[in-house]
Image (cartoon, rainbow, N blue to C red):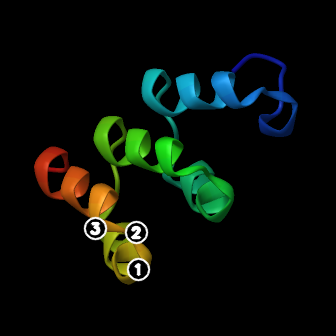
Amino acid sequence: MGDLSWKELTEDQRDFVCYNQKLTQAFINKHWNDLTDLQRNNICTYQKLTLTFITDQWEGMTEWPRDFVCNYQK
């Protein structure tokens, strides 16, 4: 993300980052609760999530993120 911080990005830029950049699990953990549904869906589809993270977040996930986790996380 260069020199920009997450808070300085527009929603469109954040959407792009969630599917086009390799995010660390620490970054995902820190920002998960503040993400939009689209951003969460992108992360569940395009990012590598740990089993611990999936287990911890599963109950709070809606149908779409759960579906993406089941289909895209190996």
Q: Is residue 35 above or below residue 21?
A: below
Q: Report whether 52 appears left or right of 3.
A: left
SS for dot 3: helix
Q: CA distance from mark 2 to mark 1?
A: 5 Å
**Neighbours of disc 1 within 10 Å: few (<14), some (14-19), many (20+):** few
Q: Quadrant of residue 53?
A: bottom left
Q: x, y percentage for residue 51?
A: 28, 67
Label 1 near label 2: C-beta < 8 Å? yes
Q: Could you tell me the amino acid type at mark 1?
A: Asp
Dot 2 crowding, Cα within 10 Å, few <14, some 14–19, many 20+: few
- For badge 3, the amino acid type reads Leu
Q: What residue is disc 3 on?
A: 51
In this rendered view, identify the residue nearer to me: 32 or 38. Answer: 38
Rendered residue at 23%/50% (across/down): 68
30 left or right, relative to 2: left
In the image, what residue type sits under mark 2? Phe
> Which image quadrant is residue 50 in?
bottom left
Q: Nearer the viewer, mark 1 or mark 3?
A: 1
SS class, disc 1: helix
Q: Are circles 2 and 3 on residues that touch, CB within 8 Å?
A: yes
Tell me the number on the disc at residue 53.
Answer: 2
Q: Which residue is mark 1?
A: 56
Distance, label 2 to label 3, CA atoms, is 5 Å
Where does the image place residue 55, in percent across and percent down from the top left?
Answer: 32, 78
